Image (cartoon, rainbow, N blue to C red):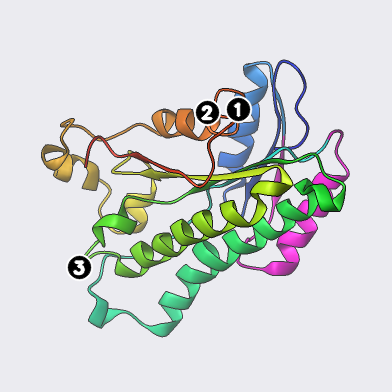
Amino acid sequence: MAGRPRCCWRVAVNFARRADAAHEAVQEIKRQGGSAFAIQADISNEDEVVAMFACIDRQPGRLATLANNAGILFQQASLEQLTAARINQVFATNVTGCFICCREAVKRMAYHHGGCGGAIVNVSSAAARLGSPDEYVDYAASKGAMDTLTKGLALEVAAQGIRVNGVRPGFIYTEMHADGGEPRRVDRVAAAIPMQRGGQPSEIASAIGWLPGDDAPYITGSIIDAAGGR
């Protein structure tokens, strides 16, 4: 998120392939009175990440917040069915891409780089705690790595005015479940969730939006579970 006017954020919406979804998000932000623009970059590609941040540098204002929300998974499978290619692809986006985005953000936010501080929110998953057996152990492991990054980086950059936190969504109604081959997965497991329902993307967005704000100035190194009690 680049710049921070008094009334709203100026938001850079990153996308790898789904330009339609990115532009829809941009329009929704504008309808709510905000400012936004879309940038295409595959975060598993370091050069594209560097170019994306260079594009943000050319926008008015400064980089105030990074929300690491990109993530991929593949068809449900047991560990014995996984290939090195699949595992590497998941980790390239979910782990390495997150690291590189954090690196570029810190270069712009840290006091010793002339920055004014900032906030980073890493969007993990309850899968990091639950393990996703027989479904997405590779995805779960990648999110566990993200949690460790969140904890370690928070300690590393706290004195540089940067707060680093995470959000662990549970079963949320998103298109990601279709990528795994089970579009109605949330409905199937709803009865096992203490709140007896899946979550909505807006409920996760609320947590992501709260952490960088003025109401959470002393919170860093924390990971919020937004999983309906599961």
Is residue 17 visible in the rendered image? The answer is no
Q: Which mark is residue 143?
A: none
Circle 1 residue: 213
Foreground mark, 1 or 3?
1
Asked whether the residues under the numbered discs 2 and 1 touch, taking CB atoms below 8 Å apart as contact, a structural biologist would say: yes
Circle 2 residue: 210
Q: Quadrant of the C terminus?
A: top left
Is residue 26 visible in the rendered image? The answer is yes
Q: Return the x and y of residue 200 as percentages of the image width and height.
A: 35, 31
The disc, 3 or 2, on the residue closer to the chain's N-terminal end is 3
Relative to 179, 198 lies left or right: left
Q: Is residue 127 above or below residue 39?
A: below
Which quarter of the figure has residue 224? Answer: top left
Q: Is residue 84 above or below residue 31?
A: below
Magenta residues, start to end: 37-61
The disc, 1 or 3, on the residue closer to the chain's N-terminal end is 3
Label 3 to label 2: alpha-carbon separation: 34 Å
Q: Please tell me whether mark 1 sits on a helix, a strand or a loop.
A: loop
Circle 3 residue: 134
**Residue at x-position 82% and y-position 38%:** 62
Q: Quadrant of the N terminus?
A: top right
Q: Return the x and y of residue 229 as percentages of the image width and height.
A: 23, 37
Label 1 to label 3: alpha-carbon separation: 38 Å
Asked whether the residues under the numbered discs 3 and 2 touch, taking CB atoms below 8 Å apart as contact, a structural biologist would say: no
Q: Please tell me whether mark 2 sits on a helix, a strand or a loop.
A: helix
